[in-house]
Every structure is written in C-alpha cells, then in structure tokens.
Amino acid sequence: KIESGTNIDIQDIWGEVDNTTGKTTILAVASLQNYGRAMDLLKISNATVTKLDTAGLHINQHSMWFKSNKNFYVVGNGVYKKNSLTDPKWILEKGHPYLYKESIRGNDWNDLFVTGDFGLVSHFNGLDWRHYEIELPLSNLYSVAVKGSIVVTVGQDGDNAVIAIGKRN
C-alpha cells in the first residue's frame, strides 16, 4: 500500500521504464470527475508520492500518457502537453474539438489516440492531430488502448455498451 496524499479520486495512471536509464516513471491524475473543483497530478517513485505542478491545466482532467524524456500529455477538458516534467507549465494544444476527452494512449510519442464524449476519436501522427467521426456519434468513449496497428475503445451509448476496434492497413 502507498498513501496517495490526496483525497481526490484517481482517474488514470501510466508508467514506463526509460530504456536508456532503466528508471521507472509512474504518473497519475486525480480529479473530481464531472465536478471540476479539484485536481492533482501525482508522481510515484518507490513508495513515495509527490504532487506535481499543475500550472496551465484546466482543473477538470481525466487521463494521462507519456513517453519518458519526450512528451507528457494530460487530457480531459482539453489536451495539454509538456516536453519535460520540469517545464514551467502545461500548454493547451489548439485545434481540438470542444468535447471532453476521456482517455489517451499511444504506441510512441508520434502515434497517440484520444477518445471522448460524443464519439470523439483523435489520432496524432507526430506532426498533426486528425479527428475522426465514427459511426456512433452519440456514444461516449471512456477508454482507449493501442498496440501496434490495433486500437480499441470502449464506452456507452445510452444504456448500451459500445466497443469499437480499428486496424491500420
């Protein structure tokens, strides 16, 4: 057990081992989902949890993903990026639909997927974000996973569960 140091619900966690240093980085985002009154970013090292600076972030965030020593992303009410955790503040990326983002995952820094409300599916190829309209426009897509050429997202449409699977050619 590790005490998180926050009484806010942890929404997402992501960890990675840096291949060059062998060092593990684990980050988590905590927020009061749908209330937007509190948020923490947490860094877990061994049995210690420290709160990270949230300067520049909107208070209602839900998911995070990073590639060590490359790019760090936090999504929810916007898509925010840092090149390094030591950067002074999170920068809001422009050009994203004004829809809540529920989840972000990637294969690498230049192959990311974001899913969210009203069927939002976005992909970053290293240069640009592309936003797709899937055939389930009223669905809220709560989680995304990607491995190689397969991307899977799950969510709900009214009382029905939704799963969408995409494959690159």
Image (cartoon, grey):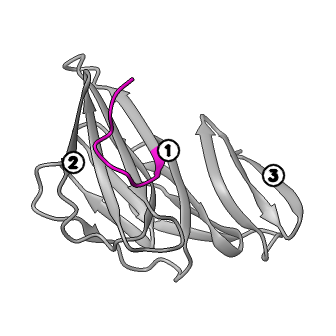
Residue displayed at 42% across by 73% down: 78
Question: Label 3 crowding class (10 Å Cα cut-off): few <14, some 14-19, many 20+?
Answer: some
Distance from Cα at disc 3 to Cα at disc 1: 18 Å
Residue farthest to the top, as pictured: 22
How many numbered discs sit on the rendered protein?
3
Per the image, the residue denoted by label 1 is 106
Q: Amino acid at mark 3?
A: Ile
Q: Secondary structure at mark 3?
A: strand
- The answer to whether marks 3 and 1 mark residues whose Cβ atoms lie closer than 8 Å is no
Per the image, the residue denoted by label 3 is 163
Residue displayed at 49% across by 74% down: 35
Q: Amino acid at mark 1?
A: Gly
- Magenta-drawn segment: 1-12
Quadrant in the picture for residue 53: bottom left
Q: Amino acid at mark 2?
A: Lys
**Is 163 placed above or below 4 here?**
below
Image position of 92 (left or right of 51): right
Residue 100 x, y percent position in the rendering: 55, 73
Residue displayed at 54% across by 72% down: 34
Residue 7 is one of the magenta-drawn residues: yes
Q: Nearer the viewer, residue 168 or 157?
A: 157
Q: Nearer the viewer, residue 35 or 117?
A: 35
Residue 30 x, y percent position in the rendering: 40, 53
Q: Secondary structure at mark 2?
A: strand
Q: Secondary structure at mark 1?
A: strand
Image position of 89 (left or right of 46): left
Distance from Cα at disc 1 to Cα at disc 2: 24 Å
The chief SS type of the magenta part is loop
Per the image, the residue denoted by label 2 is 51
